[in-house]
Amino acid sequence: MKKATIFLLSIIFSVAAIAQPLLKVTPEQAGMDSKRLSNVDRIIDESIKKGEIPGAVIAVVRDGKMVYLKAYGNKSVYPDTVKMAVNTVFDLASVSKPVGTAIAFMQLVEQGRVRLTDNVSMYIDGFKPYVDSASGRKIDIRVIDLLTHSSGLPPYAPVADIVAKSGAPNPKALMDWIANCKRDFKPTTKFQYSCLNFVTLQNILQNITGMKLMDYSKKNVFDVLGMKNTMYNPTGETLKLVAPTEKQKDGSVILGKVHDPIARILNDGNSGNAGVFSNAEDLSILAAAMMNGGEYNGRRVLGKLTVDVMTTVPESVKDLGRSLGWDNYSSYASNNGNLFHPAKTFSHTGYTGTSIVIDPVSKTAVILLSHRVHPADVGSVVRLRALVANAVAGSIVK
């Protein structure tokens, strides 16, 4: 009986440790100025009034503690108006690339199951190299080329054409198309943001582990950190918290299904380029772990050296500004603002209106979640993201 009681208590304490959210403190306790930080309220409210977004949630993390967590505007404006809440779950779109795919993939690297310099063709049968048109020389695309968007793969796939030819969902037909499509340039010579890079990484991970990406990431990343409302193809209580995205021609809205066509139509929600749903508190835990060498609350998802390598732009593509799954200073990094560290800050944005910015130097993270594609895909958050980042950075006084 005694042993059973001890065992039960150990389980309870273990679950409690996993599920514990970030400690909430005042801005002043975290070395920030409340008045300066409150500028984000004005900035986001103005964006809502302009019709750029229907609503948003912001979380600010400093040195592993929650400094600011606030909801604005509406979670839904069609078919009904529903007020935004801080626990609202958003379709992260391409923020899924680092959160759902790259972190999981880097686990395989540190486990010695794959090398960054391995050729993709080692894991994907028939995956074609780049062929120099002048010399006929073949140059293999490597794993690291996918992670840094320097592979030469096209930005996207012709979803309608693949569906017409092979039906949907059809993950194999998509991967076959990627394996054989035209390579746009020699690997590492240019930066071209491509969803196909991360679909390929998804397939490599699945071939190595024998698990779907959605299952692997939930088991080995989200559940480990206690990110209870983070998952692909949300169900149950999490589904009830999801914000809708775009209104469809039949009058319905996309709700609980990923907005991205590759992920939704061809990959049925299990996709390397998009598909993760999460909220501000869960992403704050992930940000805290990334700023703490891969560990939060005694739960580790990556080793310290792995995080350092993952978030540093490789020397071979120094001019391109992309680290392994993250954006440091590429042409896509305007969401970092102007005040966080210009080279070490790493971030990512999502088409739906989501973003995460992490400055490991000041140990500050900004999670801004919005759904600019609701009810129509017309809003823009490019300027908003930078303004919010500047307001947060400008509030740091110690």
Image (cartoon, rainbow, N blue to C red):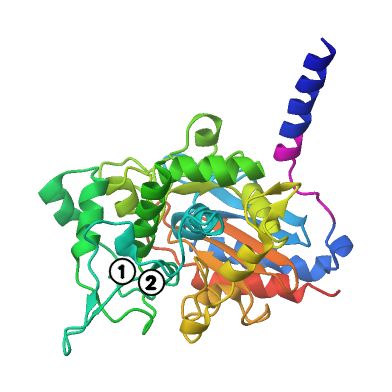
Q: Earlier in the sequence, mark 1 or mark 2?
A: 1
**Which segment is the magenta one?**
16-25
Disc 1 crowd, CA 10 A, few/some/many (<14, 14-19, 20+): few
Give the residue at x 71% y 32%.
15
Q: Nearer the viewer, residue 271 or 180?
A: 180
Q: Are marks 1 and 2 in contact (CB under 8 Å)?
A: yes
Which residue appears at 65% of the width and 58% of the height? 303
18 in the magenta segment: yes
Mark 1 — residue?
Answer: 155
State whether residue 6 is above or below residue 335: above
Q: Position of residue 174 (x, y in %)?
A: 24, 53
In the rendered view, would you say 289 is above or below 395?
A: above
Q: Position of residue 45 (x, y in %)?
A: 62, 62
Q: How far is the residue under mark 1 from the one under mark 2? A: 6 Å
Residue 126 in which image quadrant: bottom left
Direction from residue 128 to residue 86 in the image, left or right:
right
User: How packed is label 2: few (under 14 Cα within 10 Å), some, or many (20 or more)?
Assistant: many
Reply yes or no: does residue 324 show up in magenta. Answer: no
Which residue type does callout 2 highlight?
A: Tyr
Q: Which residue is at 50% across, 52% downward?
A: 100
* Magenta span main SS: loop
Quadrant of the drawing holding the C terminus: bottom right
